[in-house]
Amino acid sequence: MMRKWVKTAVPVVVASALIGCQASNTPPADPAKTADAKSEPAKSAATDKKITIRFATNYTGTSGLGGPTTKLLDKFKAENPQVDLVIETAPGFDLANKIKIDAASNNTPDVFNYWRPDPNLGMDKIIASGAIADLTELKTDPDIKDLFDEDAWKTATVDGKVRAMPMILFYNMPIVNKDIFAKCGLKLPETWDDWLAAVKVLKEKGYIPWAVSTIPAKSGTIERPLNYVLDRMLGAQRVSDLFEGLEPFNKPDVIKALDYAKELMAGYAPDDASALEDQAVFAKYVNTGKTAIIISNSGAMATVKPELLDQWVPVEFPLIPGGVETEKRMIKDLTQLYFAGAKGYADPVKKPYIVKLLKLMTGKEAGKMYYEDGGSPIPMKGVQIDTSKIPKVIVQASDIADKRPGNYWMGKKMDNAQRDKVWPLLADFWVGKYTGKQFAEKLDEAYKK
């Protein structure tokens, strides 16, 4: 059964598109062999009545992961005819609204995908409300215990309890159009000076350097270059502290870093970036050969026309002379995970099938499909990937990301109120409205309580 979710007038905060802020080929466990393996699955009160499991997702339609998700759900339905799987869909970030409303109504879906449990994405409050199941027991399940590394479990853990199963990774890496660079007489950028020269020349030649949207509440690209400049200059932990509000921005070294970022960013986005969401930027500029640099989450390349993919190559963001970082690091983390509703998980009739569905959607078979068919990097270990099915640029970028130590996204510890004040300032920064010092002062004002 498929249900579409329709927006209501209930006032809720939409999760930002800035996700950082874009997933065991062991056979699915028999319901009797779940985390509660000592007991048989409880029988339904009426043996002729199916067990209803609600599954919510935004992987529908043309979504890169829509196809793999549909195939996996079809498999679950075929293997579990006793289950009535009710599929509830909400496109894009409407899923965040749906889950928040459902949780507030004590009607959380039994299984659903969602973004990381970071403060700025809203899941921390849903967990605190008691609406999300504690999945800690699954971490030691024989089918799962060797599937993910500790970094993945760390992101999935809140206050010492595993709250989700890892699904999809993201990394932010510059991807450049080598054909456009060549037409402009530019080599692929390697140093900081190369980058500064490139954005200037690209604009002079009539190209848009950065393929970014600057709509504060809907852009997944607005902060990417700034994040890298600040990390390189100040170090990732310091940057995290700044955006959590633990120290002021109006300091000489921070101002210097912001001035560096302005030189790289200001005036180099599309003129209508404030009116276009990310997908529209790709459609209007990336897929028409008008822009030269993509810096988005790792799933973004799935929206590039297949016939254009060979024009794009990954390049690493450079070290900056005088900066704190002395080795190149990559901004990366989990981006999507699977959660379970606490009420359904506590039901002894439902729980075995919820566990089975979680295992299916985050296992090796799923990971292979997410990567090969959806072009999304995955956290599952030991998955045999046929790289011939994946665009070369994605394979190359993933290889680089795998080898580099990671930094968390700068907004990981921001709450919604902080982000809603900071991101509009960042949109102004893109058009050159502030100097580094003015931007620092504006940021400090935004963090005043």
Image (cartoon, rainbow, N blue to C red):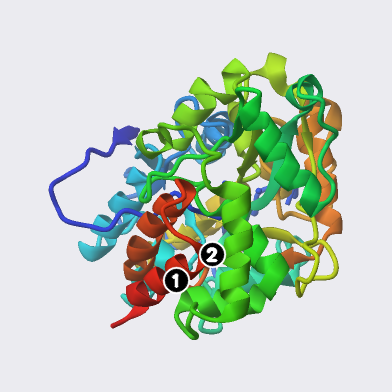
For the residue pair 79 and 190, the one nearer the viewer reads as 190
Q: CA distance from mark 2 to mark 1?
A: 20 Å
The relative height of residue 283 versus residue 30 in the rendered view (above or below) is above
Amino acid type indicated by mark 2 = Ala
Please give the name of the residue rendered at 48% of the width and 48% of the height, measured from the top-left corner: 430
Q: Which residue is mark 2?
A: 164
Amino acid type indicated by mark 1 = Met
Q: Which residue is mark 1?
A: 414
Crowd around label 1: few <14 · some 14–19 · many ≥20 (10 Å): many
Give the percent coordinates (x, y) of residue 163: 51, 70
Please give the name of the residue rendered at 86% of the width and 57% of the height, measured from the top-left corner: 403
Answer with left or right where residue 390 lies relative to residue 15: right
Answer with left or right where residue 118 lies relative to residue 210: left
Dots 2 and 1: beta carbons under 8 Å? no
Give the percent coordinates (x, y) of residue 216: 38, 50
Give the quarter of the image for residue 6. top left
